[in-house]
Amino acid sequence: MTSELDRAHFGIVVIGAGSAGCCAAIAAAETSGRPVLLVERYGFLGGVSTQSLDTFYGFFTPGDRPLKVAGGIPDRVVDRLADHGEIFLRPNTYGAGTGVTYNPEYLKIVWDDLVAASGAEALLHSKLVAIEDGGGVYRLTLDTPGGAVTVFAERVIDASGDAHAAHLLGVPLEEAGREEAAQTFTTTFRMCNVDLDRYAGAGGKKLLQDRMTRAVEAGTYPLPRKNGSVHEMVQPHCIATVAVRVPFSSPFDPRALSAAEAEGRRQAYVYEAFLRAEIPGFEQAKIIGMSSPQIGIRESRRLYGAYRLTRADCLAAARFEDAVLLCGAPIEDHRMNADGEDETEWVYVPDGGVYQVPYRTLHAPGFDRLLVAGRCFSAEHSAHASCRSMAQTMSMGQAAGTAAALSLQGDCAVDRIDIAALRARLESIGAIIDPPVDTARIGRDDWFANRNRKG
């Protein structure tokens, strides 16, 4: 009951139950043994991983000799999906690295089970509306179905995506679009009754790209871009898309966001008409769902942390003494030029390399009991465009959750924890922090030796 929750005390409260927040809560509960509360505004866990997408990227580097660069709690998630036959591997259309495609509806249950097994409490249909620093403890006001409640936390992890808790606390933040062009929004949609054999036989992805380009150049369909992707889902005869492109507008302007939602839905049905008329195998296909419950937002607010990951760090395969995760994904910057035309940038880490992400990107100077995880971590725009894949946000979550727990155990500020102890704990649960030498590369076939694959 709401009355039982009101005035409750927690060791750690995690705001936002996306892939980063779920992993943060699991790691925090398992490491600390203290009460952990995971607050989520929707009625299910997973965020984007269960709302609009169906593929984990970032587990593997691109190229012919893939290197696995994420592990630990993220592996548990994938293993649970694999145990129930709810995943397969597939190459990415633009060479961003092997994707792990999964059933997003079943993933909701996986997140439920893993969070519950860790001992963390998930509080759904609840939203942070205020937070105050009471000098040693945070006082949080949550809007719940039963009304407003107050809870107390010794540490807070902001995994809201929008840096909502950090913003309310006055943490220095960068708002996307203020300093440089921000990435576009996307309404993903799914279609059923697709004849995938007929599609593949007619040319598959190459045919799709050629006909999209022709349609845009000829003006026969008002498609927003010449490039886009459709891919097979776990569910038979179904496809998922990343094709809609809505210009960036402030995610915090309700009128602009409302207009973006409507535009995304409109574009989805333009694509449906195009696919049914122009692409073999789609003649009887229909849309069965769109991004739910909101349009896909790639960036909104980012922390000005103790360190900001830079474009140069990514492309130089940087190493850090306080590294807590790896990334080998390319800079994938979806944007429009001044004429409203697609201008996606793809820049790869040289030689199939990887860079490390330092712990300092997860906390800000002067905020001793606050950590962030997920897409609001501290990074420049271009670096963020590389390190926003879900394997990396899950890795950030497990690092932040573990760090918060160690901070509690040591009764110290989050920037004063023993980094060696943090790294050792992460590695003990399977996290990959230091790149293996070339002769010890861990590839797709090693990880998924007994699992289903699709090309």
Image (cartoon, helix red, strand yellow):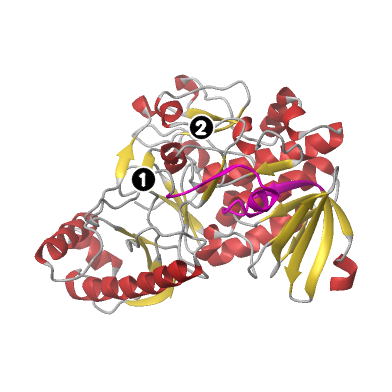
Q: Residue at image x 57%, y 50%? A: 78
- Tell me the crowding category of disc 2: few under 14, some 14 to 19, or many 20 or more residues within 10 angstroms, Cα based: many
The quarter of the displayed image where residue 365 is located: top right
- Provide residue 379's location: percent of width, then percent of height: 51, 37
Q: Residue at image x 52%, y 25%? A: 435
Instruction: Compute the Cα span from label 2 to label 1.
Output: 16 Å
Q: Residue at image x 59%, y 52%? A: 19
Residue 160 shown in magenta: yes
The quarter of the displayed image where residue 424 is located: top right
Q: Nearer the viewer, residue 62 or 247?
A: 247
The quarter of the displayed image where residue 296 is located: bottom left
Is 344 situated above or below 411? below
Which residue is label 1 attached to?
A: 333
Q: Residue at image x 72%, y 52%? A: 14
- Provide residue 98's location: percent of width, then percent of height: 41, 44
Range of residues picked out in magenta: 154-177
Secondary structure found at label 2: loop
Which residue is label 2 attached to?
A: 309
Residue 125 shown in magenta: no
Amino acid under label 1?
A: Asp
Q: Nearer the viewer, residue 182 or 278?
A: 182
- Provide residue 421's location: percent of width, then percent of height: 75, 26
Taking 312 as reference, is 17 left or right? right
Q: Is any part of residue 85 visible from this angle?
A: no
Taking 148 as reference, is 288 left or right? left
Is 15 situated above or below 392? below
Taking 412 as reference, is 183 left or right? left
Q: Residue furthest left?
A: 218
